[in-house]
Structure formats: C-alpha cells, structure tokens
C-alpha cells in the first residue's frame, strides 16, 4: 500500500509539471553541446564541469536564467537545480511475471522515480578561479530493488579545480564517476535517458553508477587540442552489488567500509568537437583495476584483481546544418571485457547509429538504434546448470528510441527494445520491452 502511494504521488507530480510546461520549444535551447564543457558564460561556470557529459544549460530548464530566485543565487556565485525523473519499463510479449518470479527489469511492471537536488558554488568569495564546489543528493525509488537500489543519500560532493586554461582538471571528494569515464551518454547529454551505452561491465568491476558514490580523486590532462588522458583513484563499490552497498552505507558518506579497496581507472582518448567542415570524432580506451576481493566462480575463493578493459568510438558521418555543426548522423561502437571467473557478465559489444536534431524545427530531439551482445560467464552458467537450473549463455538486443525536447527543461524519451536471452537464469522467454523516461530539469 505504501509503495502504491509513493508511486501515485510521484507520477502525478511529474505529469502535472510536464503538462503545464509542454510549451513551444525554444529553437536553440538544445542539450547537444559540441563538447562536454558547457558554453563559457559566467552562469554556465556553475553548471556541471569536467565530465564526459554535459547537463542541459541553465537556459534549458524550467526556471530558466531570468527568475528572481536564480538571479539572486547567480549574483552570489551559486546555483541550485533539481532533476526529477520518472521511468517505466515493461515487457509486452507476455503477461507480467509475479513478484516472486521476476528476474530482469521489465519482466513485470518496473518503475523508477528520481529526485536529485544539486548545489554548486564558484568559490569566488575565496578568491579561487576556475574552481567549483559541487554537492548533490538523490532519492532513488524503484519498484524492484535489484534494478535500483532504493536509496536516499549523497550523490556527489567534491571540489573541482582547473589549471592553465583547463589543461589540467581535478576533482576530489565523493564522485559518482559514471559521468567522468567511458562516455555513456549519446550526444554527450544527460537528457537522453533512453539512449546511450548499455553495458554494465564497468559497474561489475566496482565503478559507482547513478545513485551511488564513493571517495575519489580524478585528474584529467589535455595532451593536445583534442587528445587527453585521465586517471582516478577511487574506493570500490561493494563487490556484491548496489543493494549491499546501500545496506551498509545508508547515507553514502561512509569512507571505507570493510572489504572495499582501491579501484584505479585510466583512460586515454581523442575527442574532436564538430565545426564547419569538420566532423565530430571521439575515441576512448581505458582499463580499470580493482584490488577488492571478489568471489571466484572457478575456485570458490575470494580474490582481488577484478578489472574491466574497454574501447569505444563515435564518429559523425554527416552534418545536416552547417550553422549548427553538431546536427547530423553518427555511428559508434563499443567493446568491453572483464574476467569471467569473477563476473557473471563477461563480454559486451555494441554498434549504434543515431541522429542529433532529426528535424530542422526540433533541434533538441535525437533518435538512435542500438544493437548489443552480452556474453555471460561460462563459470557462472555452468555452476547453475550443475545445480539443475536453466540458463541463457548470452543476451542480444536491438533497441530503437526517440528523445523529445518538449519545452525548456522538459524531456520525454521513448524506446522499444527486443532482448534475446534477457536473464542469465532461469531461461525465460525473450522480451520486447517498452521504455518511457520523463525528465524535468529545474
């Protein structure tokens, strides 16, 4: 009963906001910057900085930049924003599974509600330049805890500093590093909720994912105009997964829970923003190594040395508007691997095609088609078979999605994806999943 009440309140709130705000789209309030660094205006120095992805500009938000509340905060070198999101996923090929039998997200009706407050300060009162204090919390509610987890806690709290005109950037504090490495977001924007790289292998290896955070130090160096190298020293997530992490670290502030050790991440890349007659290109490759003990499915002993190696490439095939170079057709691919003795999901490959601004009068929209293949560990699946259980050995998916920019700060993402082998065990039927994500940036 309590779960249904939370769900109704959350859905009603988001629908009311979205209905009231679905106005004519501002033609240039787009969420697809040509680089991960927001437009260099004083106001945007209070936006998210130093990551692989960019949040929408403050002008592309429900409150905009002209409200008295926001202007007063800007004057003091501060910004406060909220991100509200509702997600719904459901397999439409079969009747919903019972709560007891559910084994994957969408196997039965799955819902997620996120409320994320974020406070930033440029620290000019301390006479610091190119610096920022970034503090964010999160309420993450899900109808199925393995797809979450359910939590109310710290999301990010770190100090950011750039040196030498952004030649070197550093973050120190509690960081949810999924926005700093690999490049999960299609078009470089966090607004495209139903699109992007779907791999979970880096999170298996201990990297924090959305809703969770750990202490970290991240340093990025720009080696040339387009080449970069970055590295992180970060405390690993609990090797048993997000629900266990939350169970023993309810607030997110716990610095070093027993057993969690060092996760190191190293990534090099080449990222060229689009301009007239120059197409966007982004190649990145990295390696993360975890000294935390993971259970070895081959030996039955807990061992350190988990890792994830990855390489990704995105390239702009064609520009469709010379006045706005980011608009056009893109292709991309991903390859990732982890030790299959330590992880149930062992290999991941992806091919994607997408278009930013598919219609001239809708510059903030995007569309994508993504094919992926995930190989399951033979050690984990063989153990299940010996125990008399049925298994899938891999999963292959094909997903199409469209992101609509309904009005400033108001995004609706709709996706339809077919999954062949949607869960490791039991060997349930294939799925055709509908996904709807509604996001409001205040």
Image (cartoon, rainbow, N blue to C red):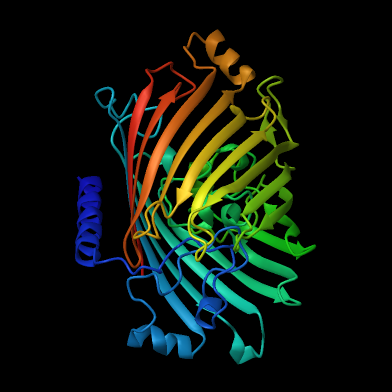
Residue in the picture at 64% in, 18% down? 379
Q: Which residue is at the front of the view, 372 or 442?
A: 372
Q: Residue 337: which quarter of the image?
A: top right
Residue 66 as seen in the image, left or right of residue 239: left
Residue 160 as seen in the image, left or right of residue 210: right
Find residue 296 and report its horizontal and vertical position in percent.
Answer: 68, 26
Residue in the picture at 61% in, 46% down? 314
Residue in the picture at 56% in, 78% down? 45
Q: Which residue is at the front of the view, 336 or 228?
A: 228
Residue 57 as seen in the image, left or right of residue 233: left
Q: Is residue 185 at least partly visible in the picture? A: no
Q: Is residue 271 at least partly visible in the picture? A: yes
**In the rendered image, the vertical position of residue 198 relative to residue 47, given as above or below:** above
Q: Residue 9: which quarter of the image?
A: bottom left
Find residue 58 and report its horizontal and vertical position in percent.
Answer: 43, 74
Find residue 60 and report its horizontal and vertical position in percent.
Answer: 39, 70
Image quadrant containing the C terminus:
bottom left
Image quadrant containing the N terminus:
top left
**In the rendered image, the vertical position of residue 137 relative to residue 352, given as above or below:** below
Residue in the picture at 75% in, 58% down? 227
Numbered-mark total = 0
């Amino acid at each position: 009963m309590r779960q249904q009440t939370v769900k109704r309140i959350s859905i009603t709130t988001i629908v009311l906001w979205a209905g009231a705000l679905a106005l004519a789209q501002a033609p240039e309030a787009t969420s697809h910057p040509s680089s991960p660094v927001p437009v260099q205006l004083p106001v945007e120095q209070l936006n998210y900085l130093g990551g692989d992805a960019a949040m929408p500009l403050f002008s592309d938000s429900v409150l905009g930049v002209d409200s008295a509340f926001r202007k007063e905060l800007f004057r003091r070198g501060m910004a406060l924003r909220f991100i509200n999101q509702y997600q719904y996923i459901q397999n439409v090929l079969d009747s919903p599974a019972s709560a007891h039998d559910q084994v994957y997200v969408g196997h039965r009706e799955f819902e997620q509600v996120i409320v994320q407050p974020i406070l930033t300060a440029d620290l000019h009162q301390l006479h610091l330049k190119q610096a920022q204090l970034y503090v964010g919390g999160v309420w993450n509610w899900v109808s199925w805890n393995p797809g979450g987890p359910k939590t109310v806690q710290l999301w990010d709290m770190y100090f950011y500093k750039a040196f030498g005109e952004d030649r070197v950037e550093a973050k120190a504090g509690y960081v949810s590093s999924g926005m700093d490495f690999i490049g999960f977001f299609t078009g470089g924007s966090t607004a495209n909720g139903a699109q992007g790289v779907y791999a979970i292998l880096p999170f298996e290896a201990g990297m924090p994912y959305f809703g969770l955070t750990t202490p970290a130090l991240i340093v990025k160096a720009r080696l040339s105009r387009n080449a970069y190298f970055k590295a992180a020293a970060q405390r690993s997530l609990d090797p048993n997964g997000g629900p266990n992490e939350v169970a023993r670290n309810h607030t997110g502030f716990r610095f070093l829970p027993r057993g969690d050790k060092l996760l190191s991440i190293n990534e090099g890349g080449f990222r060229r923003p689009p301009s007239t007659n120059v197409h966007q290109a982004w190649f990145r490759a990295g390696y993360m190594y975890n000294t935390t003990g993971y259970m070895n499915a081959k030996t039955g002993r807990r061992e350190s040395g988990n890792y994830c190696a990855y390489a990704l490439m995105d390239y702009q095939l064609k520009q469709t508007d010379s006045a706005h170079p980011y608009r056009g057709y893109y292709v991309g691919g991903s390859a990732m691997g982890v030790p299959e003795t330590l992880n149930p999901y062992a290999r991941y490959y992806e091919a994607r095609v997408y278009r930013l601004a598919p219609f001239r009068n809708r510059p903030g929209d995007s569309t994508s088609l993504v094919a992926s293949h995930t190989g399951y560990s033979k050690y984990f699946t063989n153990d299940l078979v010996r125990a008399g259980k049925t298994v899938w050995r891999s999963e292959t998916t094909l997903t199409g999605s469209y992101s609509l920019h309904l009005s400033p700060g108001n995004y609706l993402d709709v996706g339809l994806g077919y999954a062949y082998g949607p869960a490791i065990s039991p060997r349930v039927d294939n799925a055709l999943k509908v996904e709807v994500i509604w996001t409001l940036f205040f």
